[in-house]
Amino acid sequence: MGGNDWNWDDNFPDGVFAVPPNPNDPKVKVRKLVDWCKANGVSLSEAHRLPPEIMEQFLEYPNKDGTQGEREQK
C-alpha cells in the first residue's frame, strides 16, 4: 500500500475511510452531553474544558468482557 501506485478513489468508492475505535476506550454519550451543556449555558465549543468530575457522567465504559454496559432506560 506504499508508494503512489495505490488508487484511493478506486478502493474507497463511497469516499469513506475510517479507523475503528479501540474497544477498551470509553464512549461519550454525546446527546446527553449536548443537552447538559445547553441546560447549563455552556457553549459546545467549550465542552472539552469541562472538569473530569462533570465529564464522567457522559462516559460509558466497556465491561470487563469487552462489551458495552447496558444503555440507560428512559
Image (cartoon, rainbow, N blue to C red):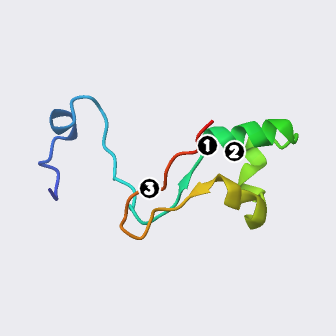
- Hey, which residue is sitting farthest right in the picture? 41
Residue 30 image offset from top left, x and y in percent: 61, 43
Left or right of 57: which side holds 70? Answer: left
Identify the element where label 1 is drawn.
helix
Amino acid type of disc 2? Leu
Amino acid type of disc 3? Gln
- Please name whichever residue, 14 or 28, is drawn nearer the observer in this view of the structure: 28
* Badge 3 vs badge 1, beta-carbon distance below 8 Å: no
Cα separation between marks 3 and 2: 18 Å
* Badge 3 vs badge 2, beta-carbon distance below 8 Å: no
- Considering only order in the chain, which callout, 2 or 3, is on the residue closer to the N terminus? 2
Identify the element where label 3 is drawn.
loop
The vertical placement of 42 against 55, above or below, is: above
Q: Using the rendered view, name the quadrant where residue 22 is placed.
A: bottom left
- Please name whichever residue, 59 or 22, is drawn nearer the observer in this view of the structure: 59
| Residue that numbered label 2 is attached to | 33
Left or right of 48: which side holds 16? Answer: left
| Residue that numbered label 1 is attached to | 30
Q: What residue sits 21% from the left and 36% below the top?
A: 12
- Considering only order in the chain, which callout, 1 or 3, is on the residue closer to the N terminus? 1
Amino acid type of disc 1? Val
- Please name whichever residue, 6 or 63, is drawn nearer the observer in this view of the structure: 63
- Please name whichever residue, 69 or 48, is drawn nearer the observer in this view of the structure: 69
- Hey, which residue is sitting farthest front in the picture? 73
* Badge 2 vs badge 1, beta-carbon distance below 8 Å: yes
Residue 59 image offset from top left, x and y in percent: 60, 56
| Residue that numbered label 3 is attached to | 68
